[in-house]
Image (cartoon, rainbow, N blue to C red):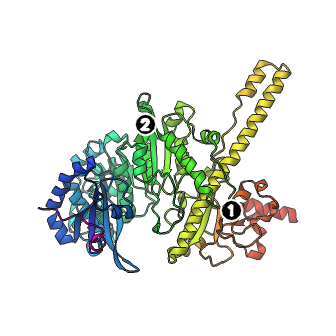
Amino acid sequence: VELPPALTEEDFDSVTAEQLTLVEFFSPYCSHCKQLAPVWEQAYSISQEEQENLGISMRQVNCVESGDLCERESIYYYPNLRLYAPVEGDSGTVGKHIDTFPRGMTRTAGNFKKYLISSVAEFKSGYANILSVSEELDVDLGLKLVAGEADEPYFVALFSSTNEQYKNGFPESCQDCVEHKQIWEKLSVLVMSESRTAHLNCHSHPVLCKQLGFPSLADPGKFLAPRYIMFVPKEVGRIRFDYPTEADINAASMKAFVSKLSRNCKYDEISPHDLLDLNVITPRLPENFQGIGYPLSNKMTLVFSYDKSTVTPEDKAIMPYLLEMATLLPFDIDLYTSSGKKFEEVIEKESKALVDYINQDETFAKRSFDRKMFLSTSLTLRPTLYIFKEHSLVPVVFQTFALEDIRMPHKIRKWVQKNMKPMFGELTPSNYKSYFIQSSVKSKDDRNDRVAITFVNSDKPKELEDILFSVSMVSHQYHYEKQEYYYQKLLKEREIKDADVAKLKEKNADSAIVIERMRKLIQHLFYRDDVAFTYIDLARFPALADNLGLNIDGKEYVAGDTLVVSNALSVYWDQNLEGTQLRFTPQQFREILKYLLDTNLVSGQKPNKLSSKLVNSPFHRHLRFFDVIHQFGFFGYVFAFIITY
């Protein structure tokens, strides 16, 4: 079968606006493209029936001949495999990039065919009933999965039913069984390009179900909600990952779980140059956000960086923990390993670009790159961890000063949970818990962390772009000013320490006392007082702030209004230093953040100018003084009663 002609700038938009289209952007000089060419041709040939019957096509773009088109579509590496779908725009139906061929999926003709089918099931209305590809799990396959001997990931559903009931119909006593089966069968098609799927009917295989830890599902007198388990090859370092019981049971949430696990469990090796190609590491940010596209893509990358000559199996044992954390967080996270030696250079370039970026703002006091401050916040031993974020010039470094640091899962878990958030991302009902933590588990480094929330309206694109650009600018400026603040404190404490040691030596103090003072550690506090920058889209979630208890005065928030919230979700600030509604103007908002960091950083303002409000306060705004008592619960009221009487 002959391939269709390559698309050009003349026909690309019209073709992708007609139907789902998988497009390969390639260069004839790219070695990877040459390797893919026969596979692509075979995939096109064996999927002719599916393309015709399901309404999806495979096309190519030669980026040497159509360079302007590839630049317009932001093609930074080859081959780039993208899925386009018709969507309604202001000027009619247009083709929009909606998905990318999975990174963790081997590029074979069969897998391309699977991806076409699953894409139709996910993105094309009217094709939700494509036949399920879930296998019926028997004892032999179950034992193979439990032992980690499968060659590829398997996502397994455990139903409280018999094989016959699953095939021919559930009893009336199980009203939800049909719905759960429908979700599962749709999911099996959606993830077929990334993972195999199988279902275990626990009433037919009670022993296996009990061995997997679900004896209640094996009880023939009960019909319970299914449970879900992902099994991966034992080479991953951990075989089983359970789908969280508190997570939503819907095809979209479960697909995200499967997709992240299946692509990240391979621990792909990557270089700094590869991350540049993927646009996760960036040499600069745009001067404005015109045409940036919404909703924002906010990909993040977690990299385990190591030295081939010194890394040990004990060091790499942290990988399954990282895999679990990356999977459970509600963000788009890729996990890689790297033995590349140029991350320090890349991070320094980004740090210099950060200074150039924040200096664009005429209202911001100009800064210059401080190499000593840079080294104090980025110097580390290897193995270590790096986090890179899209739309960000602020890489995050897990600074290790002892070899055992990388072998401490609890320490790394805290670091990942604290830092694995977009530079500025949308706050939604499904991800807000990742921004706010329970006060009972807060550490000293978390105590003064905050979440900045700006309201936007995606129905007003120009206003949206302007606000998001301002959020980007202030988020980078605050990061720099906070680092600068703690770096100066660090230098001051070092001066005091050196002076103390000098005085002890002048007094001929005992050498043990001198050594003890010299050994006293000066803490690096660069990760305190972090601010996570977010926005709430009023067009999508108009009641979210109210539901979180962030509107105790009954206001009607509009685009540009801003709140600062403690990350324990206990108090919030909604006014500027003049006592009026806080709006997201960069200069005004910077002052608020600096004031909360240290009141001395804002000249001419009194500490009592800025007052917080209690989240979910039960009192009327004229009785707001009771909030202080209410924060201490029962004991607060008892103390108030004693003082009063």
In the rendering, at what x and y percent does residue 197 appear? Answer: 27, 56
User: Foreground: 563 or 441?
Assistant: 563
Please tell me whether residue 314 is drawn above or below residue 234 in the rendered image.
above
Q: Quadrant of residue 543?
A: bottom right
In the rendering, at what x and y percent does residue 451 appear? Answer: 61, 60
Residue 161 visible from this viewpoint: no
Badge 2: few (under 14), some or many (20 or more) residues near its Cα, within 10 Å? some
Q: Of marks 1 and 2, which one's residue comes earlier in the chain?
A: 2
| 478 falls in the magenta region | no
User: Foreground: 161 or 441?
Assistant: 441
- Residue linked to disc 1: 363
At 17% from the left edge and 60% from the top edge, which residue is drawn? Answer: 44
Mark 1 and mark 2: Cα distance apart in space: 48 Å
User: Foreground: 17 or 611?
Assistant: 17
User: Which SS class for mark 1?
Assistant: loop
Please state, as top left, top right, bottom left or bottom right, where the N terminus lies in the image: bottom left
Q: Quadrant of residue 234?
A: top left
In the rendering, at what x and y percent does residue 375 appear? Answer: 60, 39
Horizontally, residue 453 falls left or right of residue 285, namely right
Badge 1: few (under 14), some or many (20 or more) residues near its Cα, within 10 Å? few
In the rendering, at what x and y percent does residue 107 appear? Answer: 25, 52
- Residue linked to disc 2: 317
Task: State if disc 2 and disc 1 touch (CB < 8 Å).
Answer: no
Query: What is the span of residues highlighted in magenta in the rendered image?
Result: 2-15
| 13 falls in the magenta region | yes
Horizontally, residue 285 falls left or right of residue 39, namely right
Q: Nearer the viewer, mark 1 or mark 2?
A: 1
User: Foreground: 238 or 106?
Assistant: 106
Q: Amino acid at mark 1?
A: Thr
Q: Main secondary structure of the magenta part?
A: loop
Q: Amino acid at mark 2?
A: Ala
Please tell me whether residue 350 is drawn above or below residue 225 in the rendered image.
above
